[in-house]
């Protein structure tokens, strides 16, 4: 390696760390500003919820199309545009004069974030040799968990001291730093051969199907049209598969799934893992406040230990996946996630505090053991020309898993509590609801563990 190449590697790694942090930090920090946004714009909580929903939907819908665009035209260009747009839109959000302007800017910010998701890890592994891929992915993953864990803490402080606008201001300055690092470190590469054809029909179908499926999932028990929207999204998914089979330059090369068992099963394992674990913080937070009578602030501090363990061990597990077959580590991690979920399913009215901490630590360690090695396994399945698409598919699986996890909670709550809110339930009813939720999550994670083990057979 020459000195300039080593410098590029370091700058690219720093860029990946900063971008992984700001995208997750923004989401977790802004959730605490919902009451402030309600008061600022004098609107309902449901409408303010679209500030988060607009971002989530556009990130999921545009990640794969942006990944394809990056692979076809150059990742550096897409990344720089994405970072710059994310920063500019952060500033525009500060000066929103009404909730509709805020929702519009957040939706556009989701598109910008999808450009970052599609390219940051793809560029990262393209400048490091295969023997170091797991290590750098582990560091990037750790930054993601730091963003998730520090978002509520820093966001709460910023919102309380300086208002919700300060969250966007901090994000802007972080994007400036990541833009400088990306400019200095991201390699100036061109696709070989350059792709000129665009699968317009495939892109439109993908964006529409993802938007409808995710919106339908998150509104199954809220809107009477939730199921209909979900079915329409699934119908578009079938149409998307038919179109992609005939496209010269498909958005997603379907043979990535049909001919590569490791790629297909690794992505499905990721989907099930995220679906089984995302709602843990939500459920346990309510449990700590309703059953154990902790304040929301204390509950938040307690919950930090799970992403903190993930952040602490992800770099180590990523480095280990360069030496040990990634699927073995990921499968063991899924097994530990099953154990952690099983511990959560046993929560009762008088569960010792130490049991809760132990469950959070086991779950955090299991996810650290799963995430980086599983990402390494996925990226090992594709050639460098498809890094962005592969990374985008994994990001879409993550978003789908998150939405499915919360959809499961809302369905179970509806079956057990009816129209009552989970936060208003009696402690015994809350424990019963959580019991059924975690049993469903255990089942999902067991299936994911089987798929993780089967991918190499």
Image (spheres, rainbow, N blue to C red):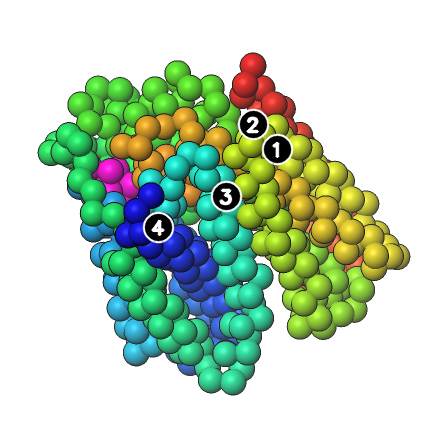
Which numbered disc flags the more N-terminal residue, 2 or 4?
4
Which numbered disc flags the more N-terminal residue, 1 or 4?
4
Q: Are marks 2 and 1 in contact (CB under 8 Å)?
A: yes
For the N terminus, the quadrant is: top left
* Residue 270 vs residue 331, the one in the foreground: 331
| Separation (CA) of disc 2 from disc 1 | 7 Å
Name the chief secondary structure element in magenta.
helix
- Residue bearing the label numbered 1: 329
Element type where label 3 sits in the image: helix
- Residue bearing the label numbered 3: 135
- Residue bearing the label numbered 4: 6
Pointer 2: residues within 10 angstroms few (<14), some, or many (20+)?
Answer: some
Tell me if residue 445 can be seen: no
Q: Where residue 428 appears, x then y in whole percent?
A: 82, 55
| Separation (CA) of disc 3 from disc 4 | 16 Å
Magenta region, residue range: 64-72
For the C terminus, the quadrant is: top right
Which numbered disc flags the more N-terminal residue, 3 or 1?
3
Circle 3 or circle 4, nearest the eye:
4
- Residue bearing the label numbered 2: 325
Identity of the residue drawn at 74% across and 38% down: 339
Q: Are marks 3 and 2 in contact (CB under 8 Å)?
A: no
Identity of the residue drawn at 40% across and 57% down: 14
Circle 2 or circle 4, nearest the eye:
4
Mark identifier at residue 235: none
Element type where label 4 sits in the image: helix
> Does residue 366 sit above or below 291 in this rendering?
above
* Residue 114 vs residue 83, the one in the foreground: 83
Which numbered disc flags the more N-terminal residue, 3 or 4?
4
């Amino acid at each position: 390696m020459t000195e300039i190449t080593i410098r590029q590697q370091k700058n690219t790694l720093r860029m990946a760390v900063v971008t992984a942090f700001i995208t997750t930090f923004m989401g977790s920090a802004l959730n605490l500003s919902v009451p402030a946004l309600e008061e600022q714009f004098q609107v309902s909580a449901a409408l303010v919820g679209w500030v988060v929903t607009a971002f989530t939907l556009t990130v999921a819908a545009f990640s794969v199309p942006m990944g394809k665009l990056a692979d076809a035209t150059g990742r550096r260009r897409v990344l720089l545009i994405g970072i710059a747009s994310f920063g500019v839109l952060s500033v525009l959000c500060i000066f929103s004069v009404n909730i509709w302007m805020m929702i519009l800017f957040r939706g556009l910010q989701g598109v910008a974030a999808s450009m970052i998701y599609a390219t940051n890890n793809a560029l990262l592994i393209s400048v490091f040799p295969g023997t170091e891929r797991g290590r750098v992915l582990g560091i990037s993953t750790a930054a993601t968990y730091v963003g998730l864990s520090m978002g509520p803490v820093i966001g709460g402080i910023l919102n309380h001291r300086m208002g919700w606008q300060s969250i966007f201001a901090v994000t802007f300055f972080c994007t400036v730093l990541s833009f400088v690092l990306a400019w200095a470190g991201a390699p100036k590469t061109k696709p070989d051969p350059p792709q000129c054809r665009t699968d317009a029909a495939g892109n439109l179908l993908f964006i529409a199907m993802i938007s409808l499926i995710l919106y339908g999932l998150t509104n199954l028990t809220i809107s009477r049209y939730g199921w209909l929207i979900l079915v329409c999204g699934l119908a578009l998914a079938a149409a998307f598969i038919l179109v992609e089979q005939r496209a010269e330059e498909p958005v997603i090369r379907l043979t990535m799934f049909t001919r590569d068992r490791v790629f297909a099963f690794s992505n499905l394992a990721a989907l099930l893992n995220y679906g089984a674990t995302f709602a843990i913080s939500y459920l346990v937070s309510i449990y700590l406040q309703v059953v154990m009578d902790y304040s929301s602030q204390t509950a938040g501090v307690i919950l930090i230990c799970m992403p903190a363990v993930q952040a602490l061990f992800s770099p180590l597990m990523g480095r280990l996946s360069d030496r040990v077959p990634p699927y073995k580590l990921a499968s063991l991690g899924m097994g530990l996630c099953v154990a952690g979920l099983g511990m959560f399913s046993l929560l009762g009215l008088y569960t010792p505090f130490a049991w809760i901490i132990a469950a959070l630590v086991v779950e955090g360690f299991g996810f650290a053991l799963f995430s980086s090695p599983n990402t390494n396994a996925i990226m090992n399945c594709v050639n460098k020309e498809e890094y962005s698409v592969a990374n985008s598919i994994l990001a879409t699986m993550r978003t789908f898993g998150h939405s499915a996890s919360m959809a499961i909670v809302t369905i179970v709550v509806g079956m057990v509590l009816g129209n009552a809110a989970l936060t208003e339930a009696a402690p015994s009813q809350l424990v019963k609801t959580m019991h059924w939720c975690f049993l469903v999550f255990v089942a999902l994670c067991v299936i994911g563990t089987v798929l993780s083990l089967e991918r190499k057979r």
